[in-house]
Image (spheres, coloured by chain):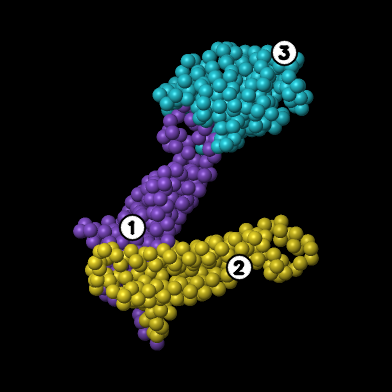
Amino acid sequence: MIEINKVHKSFGDLEVIKGVDLTVDKGEVVSIIGGSGSGKSTLLMCINGLEKIQSGSIRVDGTEVHDKGTDINKLRQKIGIVFQQWNAFPHLTVLENVMLAPRKVLGKSRAEAEEVAVNQLNHVGLGDKIKVFPGTLSGGQQQRMAIARALAMSPDYMLFDEATSALDPQLVGEVLDTVRMLADDGMTMVLVTHEIHFARDVSDRVAFFRNGLVHEIGTPDQVINNPQKPETIAFLKSVS
Amino acid sequence: MFDYTFQWGAALKALPDLLNGAVVTFNTAALSMIFGVLIALILAVMRETRNPLLNGIANTWVSIARNTPALFQIYLMYFGVGAFGFHVSSWAALVIGISFNNAGYLAENFRGGLKAVPETQRFAARSLGMTAYQTYRLIVVPQMLRVVFYPITNQMVWAVLMTSLGVIVGLNNDITGVAQEYNVRTYRTFEFFALAAVLYYVTAKLIVIVARLLSWRLFRY
Amino acid sequence: MLSTSLTMSDLLFLLHGAWVTLQLTFWAMLLGTIAGVVFGLLRALMPNASRPLGWVLDAFRSVPLLIQFVLFNSLKSIVGLDWSAFAVGCIVLGVYSAAFCTEIVRSGVLAVPMTVRRAARSLGLTYSQDLRYIVFPMATRIAFPGWLNVVLSTMKDTALVMWIGIIELLRASQIVVTRIQEPLLVLCIAGLIYYVISLVVSRLGARLETRWQEND
């Protein structure tokens, strides 16, 4: 379970998160929608400690993320994150990209790590690309590789930070299909996304972010099909 | 007006000794590069930190290395450090001096190399649970290496050329040192030093060729 | 206050050495720049015909400067020329810096985008007009920072002329060291002078560069 309590986060003088409360239960898929600069991506970075917070608390399975005593590297092993810019490691092959963390962080042997990696790459449909360098792949393929790389750590949670917004339109589908597959497998996920229709289809709950706060939250039916607040209605109108 | 006869035979007899000198030259340059690269990495990281003391030390190092002659730096090691009562041999002064110079120039290149690796690569690595050290060793440095590989090769060639300065502080077993020994004995200056020049040229070209082969092997992506 | 036997005349001696360093740098750069521009243009505009020139210049860059001083000096006596050591210093340094200037001029000219040159020709400019009004002004700006680096390294390389008997800054400091036996102090003063010259040259260069950029 991810529990976010009254989190504040600023970059210098600019406060981007202004007291967010949000809880994600085990097995739940929560989508976060909202305009750019509403603080939704920053919140994801805070959940696995890539960005520090100024006040409030974030707990993952009861462990405080921003506590100095927490072994953040250990905690990150159970939270996978996929970025907008897929961030493939360009100097490693696809297989090596996926094997790296299981070997170096989890201490698996080469053979074990390779087995895990090949499985995950088959899972996302890249089984025939394991020997090539990421630079030769399309954006959609690189993003699926990034998903496999995160999954190879057998995380309990997956965070997606606008995973499709840097992709050409015709490549969005293959990545969304992969995410949908994970949702069907029961993975706990937080998706920051611009794909409203997709959010409606896969999510258990949808949160609309505005000005660094959760402005409206509920089931997809409540928030997307029957929004109550005027700002939510305006936003949905602007993106559809 | 031109009554000089070149005596290449005498010079060729010196070839085995000069070749031994070439080995010394190469080893000295290689050693100074190993020190130079390691120190430059440290200096580059020091300049990235916000600690004013670390910053100051690194910046001073880089700017002295780049703004004074290499020969001056070698002198400072040979005569200057000697003033504290340590005896520094010619060879040690040469190695330390060139290492100091290499580190200063390479630190500047490495800074550019570090900038060339996007911050998001660090995020991605840390998000997989890697420690800061693992992230540097496995993700940042290998990618930086590609950017700084050509400057490193260049600096290695420079290091070879700089070793010739050893003769000024009394080194007598590198290429220039050996040529000078023969020169003092026979006064066949032109022949010996022409041969020395050829050896330096060949050494420099070999380094460039090997580096090119190595870069094909290393950077397949 | 530390006591020192460094006298005012020693200091003046060092400054005189620095003046010799500056003179050497000036003449060497004059020679190196003129030759470098001519050779660089040849290399850029007639790459095939000038290839042997490229090999020769590459050899100058791949052999230690110290060896070049010794070789030229002994060649001078073999041929029987009665040139001063200062002239030898200027010529060897000049040729050495020409080898570097050539590469800088060449890559400056080649860095002018083909599309710009095509645009110039499409307006009816002749080949030589294109070179004069488009290529040279652009190449000069591209090449300037590299040229400034050559100035700085030539200034530092003048230290090597001590080997053929010229008393420049570093040799002057060595002479003072031998006299007063305070190597650290004297070398630090010499180093400081080099440092200040470098700093002044690079500041002037940076100022010139920003002035150009304002006009862009």
Residue in view at x 43 percent, y 37 percent? B137
Please name the residue that numbered disc 2 is placed on.
Answer: C41
Asked if marks 1 and 2 touch (Cβ < 8 Å), the reply is no
Q: Position of residue B135 (x, y in %)?
A: 45, 34
- Amino acid on which the number 2 mark rests in the picture: Leu
Q: Position of residue B163 (x, y in %)?
A: 35, 60
Mark 3 to mark 2 CA distance (whole Å): 72 Å
Is A198 left or right of A26, judged from the image as shown? Answer: right
- Is there one chain holding both mark 1 and mark 2? no
Chain depicted in yellow: C
Residue in view at x 59 percent, y 26 percent? A18
Chain depicted in purple: B
Mark 3, residues whose alpha carbon is within 10 Å: few (<14), some, or many (≥20)? some
Of badges 1 and 3, nearer the viewer stands 3
Please name the residue that numbered disc 1 is placed on.
Answer: B97
Of badges 1 and 2, nearer the viewer stands 1
Determine the chain carrying the residue at label 2. Answer: C
Q: Is residue A144 visible?
A: no
How many callouts does the rendering have?
Answer: 3
- Is there one chain holding both mark 1 and mark 3? no
Question: For the residue labelled by badge 1, is the local secondary structure a helix, a strand or a loop?
Answer: helix
Is A203 left or right of A10, judged from the image as shown? Answer: right
Q: Nearer the viewer, residue A230 or C140?
A: A230
Determine the chain carrying the residue at label 1. Answer: B
Q: Which mark is residue A221?
A: 3
Mark 1, residues whose alpha carbon is within 10 Å: few (<14), some, or many (≥20)? many
Of badges 3 and 2, nearer the viewer stands 3
Residue in view at x 29 percent, y 59 percent? B77
